[in-house]
Amino acid sequence: MSDYDDDERPSWREIDKKRDRSSHVRQEKKERSGGARPGADRYEQGRYKQALEKLFQGKKGTLEYQKLHNAIHKSYGSSTFLAHVQKFIKAYGLPQDVSTLLLILDTKDPDTMLMTIDKLKEVAASATAREKEDIKRKLSILSMTDRSGDVKERAHEVAEELKSLS
């Protein structure tokens, strides 16, 4: 049998407290030192980082930019699509992302389409392989099917330039 009664034997919690290793003791120390809830510091850092990114984006980091950008995507295929695109371009110029530029090619407005084709040529250098392939496909389709001769010609030229770069 054992030399101790159950009443005399110290509990594991008491043993840990004596060794100062218990998680309960560490919590008590944090509460005394005024520590915040766990993860709060990381959350605050994330918020500061987002705020800085918005600051460095300039006008493109604003809520109005996001609203107009989303309006382009939501109105695609509707009668208001061209109006949303023109409003966005007037306020912020052509966007940088390939997906939105490819959508803008469906406006059927020759001037807007020509500007967009030139912008796609610029953006293609930093685009991913998938995006480059999408650009080439879209431009080759435009070069065969568009009603405007200028758009057909420009789309064909840019598509050929992109094929030769690959």
Image: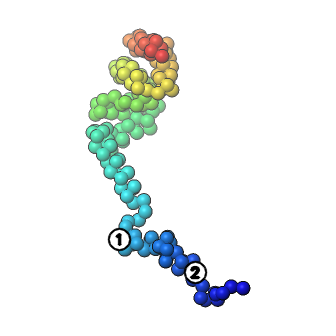
Pick whichever, 120 or 141, lies toward us.
120
- Disc 1 residue crowd, few under 14, some 14–19, many 20+, Cα 10 Å: few
- Disc 2 residue crowd, few under 14, some 14–19, many 20+, Cα 10 Å: few
Is 104 above or below relative to 15? above
Give the farthest residue toward the right. 1
Marks 1/2: CA–CA distance: 27 Å
Q: Which residue is mark 2?
A: 11
Q: In the rendered image, is residue 24 in sight?
A: no
Q: Residue at x 34, y 21 (%)?
A: 115
In what element is the residue under mark 1? helix
Residue 33 got which mark? 1
Residue 166 got which mark? none
Query: Which color mode does the image show?
Result: rainbow
The reply to whether the C-beta atoms of the residues labelled 1 and 2 are less than 8 Å apart is no
Pick whichever, 55 or 152, lies toward us.
55
Q: Where is residue 13 drawn, in percent x and y?
A: 54, 77
- How many numbered marks appear? 2
Q: Residue at x 39, y 55 (%)?
A: 42
Amino acid at dot 2: Ser
Q: Where is residue 1 drawn, in percent x and y?
A: 72, 85
Q: Where is residue 49 drawn, in percent x and y?
A: 34, 48
Q: Is residue 152 left or right of residue 61?
A: right
Q: Is residue 142 left or right of residue 86?
A: right
In what element is the residue under mark 2? loop
